[in-house]
Image (cartoon, rainbow, N blue to C red):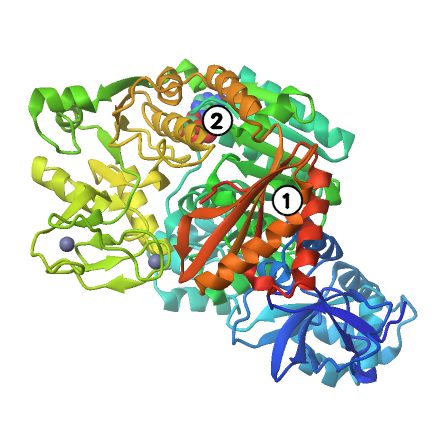
Amino acid sequence: MNASFHKVALPVPLRTTFTYAIPEYLRDSAQPGSRVLVPFRKKSLVGVIVGFADSVPQRTKVREIAKVLDIVPALTPKLIELGQWIAGYYLAPIGEVFRAMLPPLTELKTQRLAVLTQAGRDATESLSGGELSHGLTAQEASFLEKLKEKKGAWSVALAMKFAGNANALQRLQRLGLIEIRENIQGTKRKIQRVIAWKASGNAHADGALAEKEKKVRTLLETERGPLPLPQLLKLAEISRALVERMLRDGLLESWEEPLDPAEDPFDAGYEPPAHELNAEQETAFGAVRARFELGEFGVLLLHGVTGSGKTEVYLRAVQETLARGKTAIILVPEIALTLWIGRQCRAWFGARFEGVAVLHSTLTDVERAREWWRVRNGEARVVVGTRSAVFAPLQNLGLIIVDEEQENSYKQEETPRYHGRDVAIVRAKLEGATALLGSATPSLETYHHARNGKYELLTLASRVENRSLANVEIVDLREDFRQTHQTSPISAKLHAGIQECLAAGTQALVLINRRGYSWSVLCRSCGASVQCANCSISMTYHKSRNRLECHYCGSVQPVPKECPKCQSKYVYFFGEGSEHLEERLRKEFPGARIARLDRDTARTKRQYQETLGAFAAGALDILVGTQMLAKGHDFQRVTLVGVVSADSSLSLPDFRAAERTFQLLTQVAGRAGRGELPGRVLIQTYYPEHYAIQDAVKQDYASFFEREMHFRRLMAYPPFTSLANVIVRDTSLEKAIRWARTLSEYFSPRDEKGVRILGPAAAPLARLKKEHRFQFLVKSPKRSVLTKLLSGALSFCDVKEIPQTAVLVDMDPLSLL
Ligand code: ADP
Ligand code: ZN
Ligand code: ZN
């Protein structure tokens, strides 16, 4: 091992790390996990050190690391290990894996703070008793005392000045008396002034003043305890001048406290529900605790019907984890859910003592970086977030919860194509922690593992307080059409149902699976549909923005007045999306208060909060939206859920279509009747006979599982086999074909016992973002065989000089498009 060369992962689409030399003066600060600035070709790139290089490339000249960016390595050793596992398992470029794990590179400067540790505080205590512990020099001792006076934190630059030199700081750090932390500038917490009653003060004996003083005293001593100044002024109805006077008189004392960084107006007035666990929850929680007692890695599946109170079990599990001095991550599938669960966590675990951090993609880079470093610095011990929060840099991790583990949103559909749930399990394994997966409709893979004993199965079979599951009815759209001869996406039955809700003053959710106004623009003359210029997919019409958008590559076009192919004037819009549905609902129910929630209306955290908050508070009657409404929400006054088109997901060329449809419908049904009012669900469909729909109507997971497993076994699909989708792509059709042919030279002879290879064939999405795409489906019952075969394929591509970016491996794909 040679400590003067480091392996650095760089954000380039190549499957290797790069070796850099480390100049003498940087040697102490460069550690595995530190981000570094390095020269790469003609640029400078930020990468991360992932280990020491044991050999140095012979032919090329090794360049030097220019700068070490983190004094505290951004990544913990376990996270480096995790990143390496991901790169290996998903055959992903290692630099891109680490880029996904690192905090955003904000232009903000980080500030380094020297912070007094508990041991440091203890040492200063004994100093004031005249003792020099730890073999401290007098100068070091006086440094510690000064640091303590400065509230225990100094910028490193300042600390350096007082300590004399860098070595002195390092020595104190080694002794564990101080810690160096990274702070994102601008994270300086807001300070508030807190006022308390000073027991030693002498109050006025009588008069008007005495009355006021008494009031303040009662408030601060018995009723509320120390209060922030503005609150005191309001509650005691006194002037600021009086407080100042009482401070001077020694009746009060004051100090400064940071405002809670996680304080959120969303939290104002929020009281978390507090429930005694019911018998089923108690049993499940008991099993979680028993697992903690074992103190080793394990996976638990909490299979609980919708409304069975899984969240309550999660929160207890987190509480138990914290009580054991460990940290926890809660992964949720939707940004909107981070808001709910985040708020519950802050209420349960109090931001000040067990800081809660929330990580998701609508945070600005600055916010995300700040939350990230709070976690890294140990200021937050609970992290709530979406997929990438699985990389939260917690130490001493005890628990990872994956709520709604079956959700597609856990799968990243761009490089690195990892699955958040599977990474969570691997991380738990590396850290000796517990993974707790929860769902009403577990993925087939997960339930399969739970049944064969690989995971421990915990069950919540009934809703809390024995509430009944919603009553699900099918609306056969063929029948509806025969009777009404209308093609409105809102059937007569759904219309009547909503009417009833409005009359009763309860709420309705209406779901549609596509956003936009119309998802196809067709020419009546020649039949052509308007396609994206970059993708083989039709453009979606967005009425309010008055343009066509491609939902795959984001490109836009003006709305055509005539057919781009034949110039006929007869273009028409076809296939209704959420924007259109909202418009219809407004027309059909003019008095109702209606809002829409989808990726077009909710682009920021505030927009989510406003809409969801308004709906939860009863300020809305109907909420229409895409599947983001289906997941996890606990709206108590919803009595009707309508699903406008249950079929569109069934017809996709995808072996998971039935599973996805069943899960979505069951989840949706779970949003109705969660409070004291019973719920009703209307599913509109053209295929009422399909087993995915039939089982969803009965909300019968076991039945669906059996039928679907039968089909998967017959067709040799997961969980009976491991599957990978290999895509060969290029903007030039000719090159894409050539490379697909070349790659099939490698695959064809290997299509034999134990391995099945289909392809090359044009991918269902034959063109995407200007690239032509061909695919191979590779299956093997043995995962290790598959991994070896694919890594062989990639090496083969290197030999044949197929560019690495042209071949994309999607391991355990969720979608075969
Ligand atoms: P799930 O995630 O399983 O669908 P939730 O965790 O959202 O269900 O809980 C559903 C509702 O039941 C919530 O309003 C929650 O406050 C309430 N709840 C949870 N546990 C209990 C309990 N033991 N007794 C009564 N109500 C409960
Ligand atoms: Zn035409
Ligand atoms: Zn496109």
Question: Residue 396, how many percent across, how many down?
Answer: 72, 48
Ligand 2 positioned in quadrant: bottom left
Q: Would residue 500 be visible to someone looking at this image? A: yes
In the picture provided, is 10 more to the left or to the right than 640? right
- The quarter in which the C terminus is drawn is top left
Q: Which mark is residue 441?
A: 2
The residue located at (22%, 20%) in the rendering is 476
In the picture provided, is 227 more to the left or to the right than 540? right
Question: Residue 193, how many percent across, how many down?
Answer: 48, 64
**Which residue occupies the extreme right position in the image?**
135
Q: Within 8 Å of ligand 1, the CB of disc 2? A: no
Q: Residues within 10 Å of mark 1 (few under 14, many from 20)?
A: some
What is the CA distance from the residue labelled 1 to the residue labelled 2?
38 Å
- Mark 1 sits on what residue? 748
Question: Residue 319, how many percent across, how many down?
Answer: 61, 37
The residue located at (61%, 18%) in the rendering is 283
> How many numbered markers are drawn?
2
In this orientation, which residue lies closer to the viewer: 249 or 640? 640
